[in-house]
Image (cartoon, grey):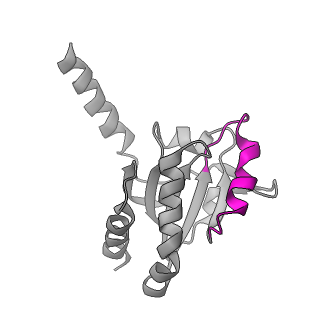
Amino acid sequence: MNKLLFLCFVIFTTINHSQTKLPNVNLTTLNGKTVSIDSQISKDKITVLAFWATWCVPCINELDAISDVYSDWQDEIDLEIIAISTDDSRTQKRIKPLINGKGWDYLILLDKNQELKRALNISLIPHVIVLKGNKILYRNTGYSPGAEDELFEIIKKYSK
């Protein structure tokens, strides 16, 4: 039975990460405006999508750690980070108060109905996707201190 569960997990993970293009889904700005994710992605530079939620402590830790080094990253590479909240209707009211105190220097978008999250088969957060245009180059789930350094090495590899 354990082997069957493991096999199902491996198949699901492979399917989950086999997508190569970012689907064009509508998201919401903090001001309530609807925008397509495609319109927010630069065609010429690396974009990092960081999926998070207000209740997810590792997500907040990851975004704080990236915020600390983001300007250094931008000095070295032309990149953009978009933090996409996956909060549901019960916790969406916490987003603005949380980010107001953070000083995060990147675009925050809301995946109000979790359409993008579902379209990308994201089951766990934090989840980071590295893109060039709408092509998915790298995906990672989870966060531990120092993971931002590994992420930057991957970004540098793909920016060449």
Residue drawn at point x = 69 percent, y = 42 percent: 112
Left or right of residue 16, residue 14 in this image: left
Which of 24 and 72 lies nearest the eye of the viewer? 72
Which of 156 and 56 lies nearest the eye of the viewer? 56
- Looking at the image, the residue that sits furthest to the top is 1
Q: How many numbered marks have been drawn onto this rendered protein structure?
A: 0
- Looking at the image, the residue that sits furthest to the left is 3
Q: Is residue 72 magenta-colored?
A: no
Residue 4 appears in which quarter of the rendering? Answer: top left
Q: What x and y, as percent, mark residue 123? A: 46, 36
Vertical position of residue 143 compared to residue 46: above or below: above
Q: What x and y, as percent, mark residue 124? A: 45, 39
Residue 107 visible in rendering: yes
Q: What x and y, as percent, mark residue 2? A: 20, 18
Q: Quadrant of the C terminus?
A: bottom left
Q: Is residue 92 magenta-colored?
A: yes
Please provide the residue range marked out in magenta: 85-104
Left or right of residue 79, residue 147 in this image: left
